């Protein structure tokens, strides 16, 4: 009884902080991860989201493009990468790139989301040319390209600073950066899971430089493997510290780790409870972010719908065709229609809002 009363008291303290807009600590976050009152956590996150976004839920019509899957890195969670010459390895040239887009094109697409392998077999100019080629053919489409980890990789292969890399990419037509490559922003995690990729400081620096150059960017967290709950919270805290300095992040996207194969058992996936709790805690911890996204590709459309009362204000987009999560066992479809997204949002008693990359409203449904 005493423990229960103590937990109620602690929850009330956190609720008061949330009510008055006070920043939660990592210790507060740990309590929220441990409390049995999941619906209480959801209620607090929902309050914060309603305060920031009302009943609006955003989505975008976008196309994923992965120009190459050749990669020098050896991330233990990746099923997408191939070594040079390995079966299934590919690198699109201009003609293949445009053919890929043309086959999937419709006039409602507003964003190209471009992520690929760290392919050291091609020069930095290849990555610049990918953007130039797309911008020449589709000047009206926003180019969201290359993660913070890729920016650090380009800096190494080109022998120039990350700032110079970003300046060249912006000249080529880069409009924003995706949030990938963050994984978990602690060195213990990165040394075990992604030892060949940008360090914590390098990933954060890439985004800080981008913000300084006028780009607004995205931030992710890949959870559900070897990280501790405290490391998830340290990750969130590092992002909000950078956001305090730059206000350059538009949205935070928690990504549930996918197993190596779709046939792997349920115990190899994150639980629905963990997914919902992580979205809610993200909303509560990241007080200086406007949006937290529920990524339906990872958690499925039904949990995504539930997430709309756990603090999420964005459900991503139509995608057309997603490869990276599906290469490691995602069970969801690789695309979804606008009609399905609108239905998903409306049946959660929310207002669907089609947006552009920068959260400008295209249409309310």
Image: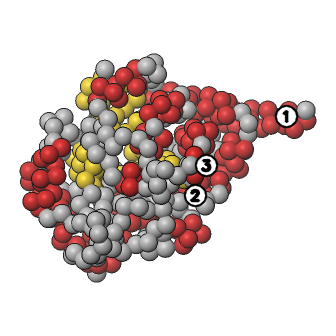
Q: Secondary structure at mark 2?
A: loop
Tell me if I can see residue 244 in this picture.
Answer: no
Which comes before the other along the chain, label 3 or label 2? 2
Tell me the residue that label 1 is attached to.
Answer: 4
CA gap, disc 1 to disc 2?
30 Å
Tell me the residue that label 3 is attached to.
Answer: 267
The answer to whether residue 86 is left or right of residue 236 is left
Which comes before the other along the chain, label 1 or label 2? 1
Is the Cβ of the residue at disc 1 closer than 8 Å to that at disc 2? Answer: no
Foreground label between 3 and 2: 3
Question: Which residue is painted at 16% across and 52% down in the image?
Answer: 100
Q: In this rendered view, identify the residue nearer to me: 88 or 13.
A: 88
Is the Cβ of the residue at disc 3 closer than 8 Å to that at disc 2? Answer: no
Q: Position of residue 186 (x, y in %)?
A: 56, 65
CA gap, disc 1 to disc 3?
29 Å
The circle on residue 225 is 2
The answer to whether residue 327 is left or right of residue 193 is left
Question: Is residue 108 shown above or below 258?
Answer: above
Q: How is the image coloured?
A: secondary structure
Question: Is residue 56 shown above or below 14?
Answer: above
Residue at the far right in the pictured view: 2
Question: Is residue 207 shown above or below 336?
Answer: below
Question: Which residue is painted at 47% across and 34% down in the image?
Answer: 304
Q: Quadrant of residue 295?
A: top left
Question: Which residue is painted at 53% across and 60% down in the image?
Answer: 184
Q: Position of residue 65 (x, y in %)?
A: 25, 53
Q: Position of residue 195 (x, y in %)?
A: 49, 73
Tell me if I can see residue 282 in this picture.
Answer: yes
Q: Quadrant of residue 105?
A: top left
Q: In this rendered view, identify the residue nearer to me: 107 or 93.
A: 93
Disc 3: CA contacts within 10 A as few (<14), some (14-19) or many (>=20): few
Disc 2: CA contacts within 10 A as few (<14), some (14-19) or many (>=20): some
């Amino acid at each position: 009884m005493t423990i229960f009363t103590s937990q109620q008291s602690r929850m009330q303290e956190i609720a008061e902080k949330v009510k008055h807009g006070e920043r939660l600590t990592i210790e507060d976050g740990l309590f929220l991860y441990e409390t049995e009152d999941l619906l209480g956590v959801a209620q607090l996150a929902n309050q914060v989201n309603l305060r920031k976004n009302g009943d609006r839920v955003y989505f975008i019509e976008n196309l994923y493009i992965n120009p190459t899957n050749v990669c020098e890195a050896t991330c233990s969670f990746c099923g997408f990468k191939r070594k040079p010459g390995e079966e299934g390895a590919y690198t699109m040239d201009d003609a293949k790139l445009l053919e890929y887009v043309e086959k999937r094109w419709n006039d409602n697409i507003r964003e190209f989301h471009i992520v690929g392998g760290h392919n050291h077999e091609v020069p930095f100019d290849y990555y610049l040319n990918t953007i130039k080629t797309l911008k020449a053919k589709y000047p009206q489409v926003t180019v969201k390209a290359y993660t913070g980890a890729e920016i650090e990789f380009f800096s190494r292969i080109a022998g120039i600073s990350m700032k110079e890399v970003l300046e060249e990419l912006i000249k080529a037509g880069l409009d924003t950066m995706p949030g990938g490559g963050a994984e978990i922003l602690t060195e213990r995690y990165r040394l075990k899971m992604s030892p060949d990729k940008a360090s914590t400081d390098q990933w954060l620096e890439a985004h800080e430089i981008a913000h300084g150059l006028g780009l607004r960017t995205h931030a992710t967290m890949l959870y559900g493997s070897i990280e501790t709950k405290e490391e998830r919270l340290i990750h969130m805290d590092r992002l909000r510290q950078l956001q305090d300095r730059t206000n350059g992040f538009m949205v935070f996207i928690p990504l549930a780790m996918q197993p190596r194969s779709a046939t792997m058992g349920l115990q190899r996936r994150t639980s629905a409870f963990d997914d919902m709790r992580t979205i809610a805690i993200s909303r509560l911890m990241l007080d200086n972010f406007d949006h937290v996204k529920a990524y339906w590709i990872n958690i499925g459309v039904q949990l995504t719908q539930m997430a709309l009362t756990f603090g999420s204000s964005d459900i991503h987009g139509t995608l057309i065709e997603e490869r990276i999560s599906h290469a490691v066992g995602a069970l969801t479809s690789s695309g979804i229609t606008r009609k399905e997204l609108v239905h998903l949002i409306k049946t959660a008693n929310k207002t669907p809002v089609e947006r552009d990359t920068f959260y400008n409203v295209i249409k309310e449904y």
